[in-house]
Amino acid sequence: MLKEIYKKIEKFDTIVIARHIGVDPDALASQMALRESIKKTFPQKKVYAVGTGSNKFNYFPKLDKVSEYQNALLIVVDTPDKKRIDVTDFDQFAYRIKIDHHPYIETFADIEYIDDKASSASEIIYCLIDNTPLVLDYDVAKIIFLGIVSDTNRFLVNSSYKTFEIVSKLVAEFNLDLPELYSNIFMRPLNEIRLQGYISENMKVSENGLGSIKISNDIINKFGVDVGSSGNLINNFNYIEEVIAWVIASEDVKNNVIKINIRSRGPIINHVAEKHNGGGHAYASGAKVSSIEEADSLIEELDEVCKLYLENKGDKNEN
Ligand code: AMP
């Protein structure tokens, strides 16, 4: 199917690459790596990466602003469902391709390449480039590396032998400057680290191993951070002995919602997120809820999932 995708890329003169709303480094990296690679392979083509950006990720190349896509190919990366695609006029495109590593939700494209075992969308873009005449150079390699490292949280999650093989090839072949690349992704303002301290101090841990905390707007202001900070910190609570799944609910007054970040190292959590205007991966999900009461229900449902997980694990250990 990767060859089929390449043929479509070869065919269209205008290509638009989109990804999900609520931009994150892997979504941007897969989008940018593909754009740069196509441009270098076919300099005469018009290739655009679209969607709302964030200053946080200004170490990536810039996004494009385009509004007219005559007879264009749309490639959507890192997005399982239509409603979360950050693109206007989806129906205007002549042909659509999905490239994703989330669990399947729905079909919205003419070709869908889904590998939910892949560490990241960036890993799939590497495979696309590696299996076709698309160009891989230093700039593209750097972007793919950033996407993979970020989505695997430095290879703590979702990393297979293939992930390590790819990363090792990129580092060896392009002599990547790792400290510089790591500082792009992992540098944090002190305020955010102080908020991390607050979360550690105040996270409630249930008897079923669910860690949970609600961050009010007052706390966000007190620490001088923004509502996205919880999302930046959520991965840092992995490997706490007493915690098998954890959730941070942050009040987002600007959008009048409560933003939910959930992670797990055992219980499957995305079904709970899906019930609350959210979704994601089995062990890394997010949602948006409309009230504290709904946040509390979601936390209770997650606790139940943890409880069942521990019970099943107990049964298996007994057998
Ligand atoms: P986050 O906690 O924001 O890093 O998100 C973890 C995963 O859940 C990512 O794969 C997101 O794409 C997905 N996700 C986050 N928020 C939502 C949402 N509101 N709806 C669907 N998926 C989401």
Image (spheres, rainbow, N blue to C red):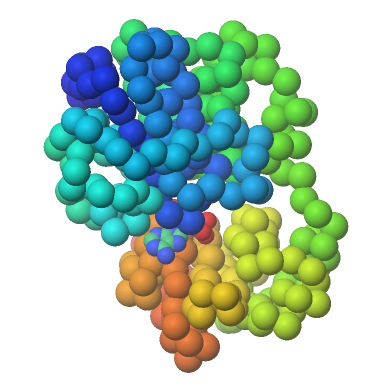
Image quarter where the N terminus lies is: top left
Residue at 27% from the left image edge and 36% from the top image edge: 69
Q: Can residue 205 be seen here?
A: no
- Determine whether, in the image, residue 44 is placed left or right of residue 310: left
197 in relation to 202, above or below: above
Q: Can residue 247 be seen here?
A: yes
Q: Residue 70 in the image: state x and y as whole percent.
A: 22, 33
Q: Residue 142 in the image: state x and y as whole percent.
A: 59, 23
Where is residue 236, by image quadrant?
bottom right
Q: Quadrant of ligand 1?
A: bottom left
147 in relation to 217, above or below: above
Residue at 34% from the left image edge and 8% from the top image edge: 133
Q: Residue 51 in the image: state x and y as whole percent.
A: 44, 46
- Determine whether, in the image, residue 161 is placed left or right of residue 315: right
Of the pair 95 and 210, the residue shown nearer to us: 95
Residue at 52% from the left image edge and 27% from the top image edge: 144
The residue positioned farthest toward the front in the image shown: 68
Image quarter where the C terminus lies is: bottom left
33 in relation to 218, above or below: above
Where is residue 175, by image quadrant?
top right
Of the pair 314 and 20, the residue shown nearer to us: 20
Q: Residue 279 in the image: state x and y as whole percent.
A: 37, 62
- Determine whether, in the image, residue 72 is placed left or right of residue 87: left
